[in-house]
Structures are given as structure tokens and as C-alpha cells.
Image: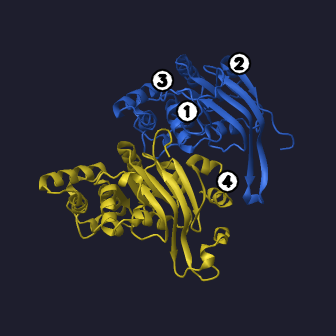
């Protein structure tokens, strides 16, 4: 048992417990100035809850998500997460290999902007995420197609490269790639910003289906109707005074 | 140390490589603070200095940095192409990871290299015998392992390996010299994978290839990694290559590792001034 994973430490009934999370960027190219992105933030999420980070643009909502996924290194605070085996890890400080393991098997993230390898087909992009979890190539491909179909990506595009897709199509591949993993926790950074009404409906249906399997969600949405209909927990992220 | 129930495949401890004269200042603590890898006292060059890292099974680790930062020296030391000046490397596939491989005899080093490591160099002429056919280059590697080689079996394996790197069967017997750069890199890959290594070392595998060929070679490397689960150390000055292929990244400058972390974190939230400059310079 590694140091970061202590069985005696429990989170009560929380899946995620963020305490005094802070993020400050130090920009060396600008003479080392400090830019504060997240002021101390604390919140908890129980299993199956849907947390929505709310606050004006620039308040640091995306930074909070990126800190949880460890794309950003938190400057202070703890992000304790209860793993599938009930061990508790601090995502802010645990070893990188542990984060990689959790990303592969437990936490998926839908970023605002889709990025994938060039010259890899849409179905392969989605299937790889599933194959990384240990599914066979055929199984992974089959499941990938289920999600591509659910997000109404036309079958003739399955073998095409997502770089050539429209913004909305790319975002749907992005969602398919996250959902095919059947994550315990799903992080969503404005996943519907580039989607039309039909695609949003499909997104909500897919979301409902994976939430039915027990997925806990934490997301950022600008559409207030969506916040009202999805959120079981609204987490206020306050902007910093004077930046 | 086990992590998530896994032991590291490779452990590198305080690896250093010096060229030229070596003086007390080269070994002193002030060496870490210098902005250059040339010693102001004696003029000696520290190509690599106190490099430490671990690589886990199935993991892909990137090494980035500008020309002269020591990336390739690091790789060549690990492939026993050149002896390090100091440091240790432990490899779980050899002697259960208990022996510093740099202390092995030349013969045992060769045995470790031919059975456990594969390497792809930036220039094909370092990794291939260009006067031999693609098939012969790969078969040569297979023959080192075979006790009593049987022609048909070696030939069959050669075709299967070259097929994996998408080489048309009709060209297997052509001289490697006649191939394009992208094809030569693919032959190097097939050759490197021949002994079913646990660790693949890639030194700028796609530099010098045009972008479309680069994309197909990168896709090939990524799929082979996923299929075989081989661990990889990828040296590149191209952050795009590292973003695409690797899980974690070491950033090197003047022979030292100045930063290491998850690849997406290093690229989106770089901590060291040099990494920030590097990331800000991506086209």
C-alpha cells in the first residue's frame, strides 16, 4: 500500500472531497508575475451526484476541473478521491502513475477543445480509450460504434479522421470517447457549447444512461436550463478581486 | 518500490556523461546552477548530469529539450552505445533488477541489448545496414536469438514483422538503401521489435520526415505500443510528438532534468522557466 493510499482514511459518503484548493500560475516569461486562477475552494460530491461549477467567465471553473484531472498542478489544498477499491488518494499530490491508472479506469474528462492523434479514424480514437482499459480490439471497436451511433456520427465518417470533422462532430467524438470508458466520475468542461439542439438531446440521453450505471459527474455549463435540469449540487466558484 | 502493485521496468540513478577534461568544479554542487553545460574552470562538457527516473511496464516516457540538452546522450548510454561517466541503471528484465547494468561485462551488455532492448535512431544508417535488404536487416536480429535457425521460420517471422510496420511484401527483398526515409524508419521499427523487447528506445524517430509520413509513423508507433504493451522512451525536440505518444515527460536543459510530470500537465501547466519558454514556442 503506497503512502498516498491510506485505507483508514475515509471520506464518509463522499466520492470526491476538495478542500481549500488553490491554483496560482507563475509566469516566468513575464518576469515571474503570479496569476491567481482559483481562490481557496472547498466542496464535496457524493456518488451519483451531479455537481455543476458555477461562476462568471474567468472565475477559474476550468482550472478547478483541470486541477482535479491533474492537468494543472494545484498550488495548495487537497483533492481527495475514493477509488473503486475504496482507497483514498489525494489527486493533488499522489504519484503520477496513480493518476494515469485512475484516468485509464475511473475518471474521464471531456475537454472544451477536442484533441486526438492525426491519421487515426474516429472509431479507433474511441476504441483506443476502451482498449486501454483491457477490452479486446474487437470488443472495444464494437462498443465504440455503439457510442458513435448514439451520438449520431454518420457511419460513413467512422473511418474518417476526426481532424477533418466539424466542431460539433468533433465534440461528439470527444463525448463518445469519454463515455465508452464507463467512468466512475466524468468531468465535463462545457461539453455542449458547440452542439445543436438535437445533439444536446442525444448528449442528455447518453448522460442519463451512464448516470444510471452510477457515474458521478462534475461539469461546467453555460446554459442555465441545463444547470437547473442536471445539477444536484451547485458549486459557486468566486472570481478573485482585482485578479 | 512497487507502485499500484507494479515494479519499475527501468530505474536510472544519477546518470552522468562527461566529455573532455574533468575537474573539481565539474563535480561540485555549483554545477547544477550553471546556465551552460561547459565547465568554466576546465572547459569540460557535461552532456548529462545526475539524471534520475523510473519507467514502469507499459509506460511511455518522453524526453524533450533543445539540441545539446543531453537527450540523445541519455538514450545512447541506456543502449550501451557509450559508457556513462557515472550512474546506475537497473532493468527488471535482467537479474531481477538487482544489478547495475553498467557494471556488466561487454558480452553480457550485448546479451541484454539484443534480447531486451530495441532502438530506433534518428538516422536510419545508424540502425540499419543499408547494403542489406529490409528482410535481411530484420532476420539478422532474429538470428542472434535463434539457437538453431531454421530458414523458413526466420523468413516467416521477418515477413510478419515487416507486415506489422506496413511494408509491402513485394519490397522485403529490396536493398534498404533504396527506401524512402519513412520506409527506413519502419524497417528500423520492425528490427527493433524483432526480439520482442520490453523496452523500446526511440531517438527522434520522426525528425526529418515530412508531416504526412511523420503522422503515419507516429500512428504506427502508437498502435504497436498498444498492441504489444512495450515500454518506450521517446526522445524528441518536437512537443507534438511527445504529446501524442507519451504518458509522462522529462524536460532536459544543459544536461539536467529541469522538470518532469504528466505530459499534459507539463504542456499545459509548465513550472520551470525553460519549459514555459519551450511550450510558448510551439507553432
| Residue A153 seen | yes
Residue B149: give x, y in percent of width and height.
15, 57
Distance, label 4 to label 1, CA atoms, is 25 Å
Q: In the displayed structure, would residue A136 be above or below residue B212?
A: above
Which residue sits at x=37%, y=60%? B119
Q: In the displayed structure, would residue B18 be above or below residue B80?
A: below
| Residue A190 seen | no
How many residues crowd mark 1 within 10 Å: few (<14), some (14–19), many (20+)?
A: many
User: Same chain for marks 1 and 3?
Assistant: yes
Q: Earlier in the sequence, mark 3 or mark 2?
A: 3
Q: Which quadrant would residue A44 be assigned to in this image? A: top right
Which residue sits at x=41%, y=71%? B82
Residue A133, numbered circle: none
Distance, label 2 to label 4, CA atoms, is 38 Å
Q: Nearer the observer, disc 3 or disc 2?
A: 2
Which residue sits at x=47%, y=55%? B11
Amino acid at each position: 500500500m503506497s503512502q498516498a493510499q491510506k485505507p483508514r482514511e475515509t471520506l464518509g459518503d463522499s466520492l470526491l472531497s476538495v478542500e481549500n484548493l488553490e491554483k496560482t500560475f507563475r509566469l516566468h516569461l513575464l518576469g515571474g508575475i503570479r496569476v491567481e486562477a482559483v481562490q481557496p475552494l472547498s466542496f464535496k460530491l457524493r456518488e451519483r451526484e451531479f455537481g455543476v461549477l458555477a461562476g462568471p467567465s474567468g472565475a477559474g471553473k476550468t482550472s478547478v476541473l483541470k486541477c482535479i484531472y491533474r492537468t494543472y498542478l494545484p498550488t495548495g489544498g487537497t483533492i481527495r478521491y475514493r477509488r473503486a477499491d475504496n482507497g483514498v488518494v489525494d489527486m493533488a499530490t499522489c504519484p503520477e502513475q496513480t493518476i494515469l491508472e485512475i484516468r485509464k479506469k475511473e475518471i474521464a474528462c471531456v475537454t472544451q477543445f477536442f484533441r486526438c492523434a492525426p491519421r487515426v479514424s474516429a472509431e479507433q480514437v474511441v476504441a483506443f480509450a476502451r482498449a486501454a482499459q483491457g477490452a479486446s480490439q474487437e470488443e472495444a471497436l464494437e462498443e465504440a460504434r455503439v457510442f458513435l451511433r448514439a451520438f449520431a456520427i454518420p457511419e460513413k465518417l467512422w473511418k474518417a479522421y476526426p481532424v477533418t470533422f466539424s466542431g460539433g462532430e468533433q465534440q461528439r467524438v470527444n463525448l463518445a470517447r469519454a463515455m465508452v470508458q464507463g467512468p466512475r466520475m466524468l468531468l465535463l468542461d462545457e461539453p455542449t457549447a458547440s452542439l445543436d439542439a438535437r445533439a444536446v438531446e442525444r448528449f442528455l440521453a447518453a448522460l442519463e444512461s451512464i448516470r444510471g450505471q452510477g457515474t458521478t459527474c462534475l461539469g461546467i455549463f453555460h446554459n442555465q436550463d441545463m444547470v437547473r435540469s442536471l445539477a444536484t449540487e451547485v458549486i459557486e466558484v468566486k472570481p478573485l478581486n482585482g485578479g | 518500490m512497487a507502485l499500484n502493485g507494479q515494479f519499475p521496468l527501468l530505474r536510472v540513478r544519477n546518470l552522468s556523461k562527461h566529455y573532455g577534461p574533468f575537474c573539481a568544479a565539474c563535480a561540485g554542487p555549483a554545477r547544477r546552477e550553471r546556465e551552460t553545460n561547459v565547465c568554466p574552470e576546465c572547459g569540460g562538457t557535461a552532456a548529462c548530469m545526475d539524471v534520475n527516473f523510473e519507467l514502469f511496464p507499459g509506460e511511455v516516457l518522453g524526453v524533450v529539450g533543445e539540441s545539446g540538452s543531453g537527450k540523445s546522450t541519455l538514450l545512447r548510454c541506456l543502449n550501451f552505445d557509450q559508457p556513462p561517466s557515472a550512474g546506475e541503471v537497473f532493468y527488471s528484465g535482467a537479474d531481477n533488477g538487482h544489478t547495475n547494468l553498467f557494471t556488466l561485462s561487454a558480452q553480457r551488455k550485448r546479451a541484454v541489448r539484443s534480447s531486451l532492448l530495441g532502438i530506433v535512431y534518428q538516422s536510419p544508417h545508424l540502425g540499419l545496414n543499408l547494403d542489406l535488404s529490409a528482410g535481411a536487416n530484420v532476420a539478422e536480429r532474429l538470428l542472434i536469438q535463434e539457437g538453431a535457425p531454421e530458414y523458413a521460420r526466420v523468413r516467416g517471422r521477418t515477413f510478419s514483422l515487416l507486415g506489422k510496420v506496413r511494408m509491402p511484401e513485394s519490397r522485403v527483398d529490396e536493398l534498404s538503401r533504396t527506401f524512402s526515409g519513412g520506409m527506413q524508419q519502419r524497417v528500423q521499427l520492425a528490427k527493433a521489435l524483432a526480439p520482442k523487447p520490453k523496452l523500446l528506445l526511440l531517438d527522434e524517430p520522426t525528425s526529418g520526415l515530412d508531416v504526412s509520413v511523420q503522422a503515419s509513423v507516429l500512428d504506427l508507433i502508437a498502435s504497436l505500443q498498444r498492441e504489444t504493451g512495450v515500454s518506450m522512451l521517446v526522445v524528441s525536440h518536437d512537443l507534438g510528438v511527445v504529446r501524442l505518444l507519451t504518458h509522462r515527460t522529462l524536460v532536459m536543459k544543459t544536461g539536467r532534468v529541469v522538470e518532469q510530470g504528466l505530459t499534459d500537465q507539463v504542456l499545459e501547466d509548465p513550472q520551470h522557466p525553460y519549459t514555459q519558454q519551450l511550450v510558448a514556442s510551439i507553432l
